[in-house]
Image (cartoon, rainbow, N blue to C red):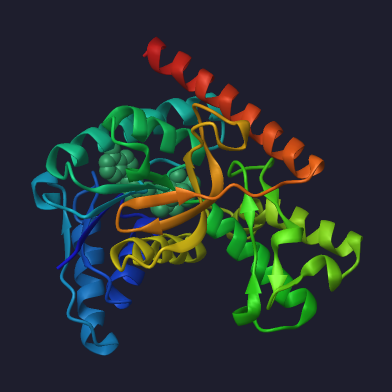
Amino acid sequence: MSKVTVVGSGFVGATVAQYVAEKDLADVVLIDILEGIPQGKALDLLEAAPVNMHGRSIVGTNSYADTKGSDIVVITAGIARKPGMSRDDLLKTNAGIVQSVAKETFKHSPDAIFIVVTNPLDVMAYLTWQTTKLPTNRVIGMAGVLDSARFAAFIGMELNVSVEDIRAMVLGGHGDLMVPLPRFSTVNGIPITELMSKERVEALCQRTRDGGAEIVGLLKSGSAYYAPGASVAQMVESILRNKNRLLPCAVQADGKYGIKDIYIGLPTVLGRQGVERVIELKLNSDEEAALKKSADAIKDHINLMNQLLVAV
Ligand code: APR
């Protein structure tokens, strides 16, 4: 029986728990610092099990002892930026939370694969890797699957074709500088550049870059959780079922694409070892320049985080 621990029982964490249990992927432990929230959400999900017909155990807790022996740890714990709070304050607070969560969960599940969801994503994935000192294949950031899913959804709406036939690829950091790749985004193998004008392709790329903000703008308080939750579940499935799916994930670049020492979204093959391999695509000069710009921004952000953590 596989076991997945989800740290942070907020909107994203609870949605991850729901999809993981309902897709019958693993037993789930939901943990949070708030008392009652993980217990309440776990019980509610368990009460949905007879309707959705799965026999998965879902436990809500405030004790890390219950997370012992997890195959996968998903980190969604953190706070959202509040009015009047600077980006640096958010970075510092979430870095402190992710660092303590990574330490605690690693203590109880030293063999786990870590999937990081807390924002700023690429920086938090890097921090989890640094904190746990795990091999790079076992610390992975979730962003590329989500950004690519958004891109695919917009392509489907634009062309009025089934999303079943759409494959989209978005690389780079999870932010304004992400790199949607129209040449590698297809409708049943046909690049979208063959199916719509350059202007429409660029409009869909821009909507993808703004995808998170578009949801925040509509929700007013809080950010997206259905598509992020589904994206994590797809990664969990590929790992636990050793499916070797090719999915864009935030990984330690390790010199690939000329990028070193940071976490950034690249095409990866996900299997039972976590990142089985990173695929190196031959990018054109524009794509390469966009990826480099994105990598430089992440590097700056990591440096800033290191300064803020030293200052604590
Ligand atoms: N340990 C455990 N849980 C914590 C900790 C901690 N140290 N600190 C905060 N949490 C919990 C909060 O109590 C809250 O229940 O993390 C949860 C975060 O949930 P939400 O505020 O609902 O945020 P959510 O929408 O789920 O987003 C979580 O994912 O997509 C990213 O940007 C998003 O960084 C954010 C994260």
Q: Residue at x 30, y 58 (%)?
A: 272
Quadrant location, the C terminus: top left
Of 253 and 131, the residue lying toward us: 253
Q: Residue furthest left?
A: 65
Q: In the depicted view, which residue is nearer to us: 252 or 203?
A: 252
x then y, percent, for residue 51: 26, 89
Toward the viewer: 94 or 115?
115
Left or right, residue 261 beside residue 164: left
Q: Percent x, y for residue 205?
A: 75, 56
The image quarter in which residue 211 lies: bottom right
Q: How many marks?
A: 0
- Is 265 on the left or on the right of 176, as rendered? left
- Image height check: is 28 above or below 252? below
Is residue 81 visible to the viewer in this orientation of the structure? no
Which residue appears at 73% of the width and 39% of the height? 288
Residue 13, percent from left and from top: 35, 57
Q: Residue at x 58, y 44 (%)?
A: 174
* Residue found 24% across the figure and 72% down from its top: 44
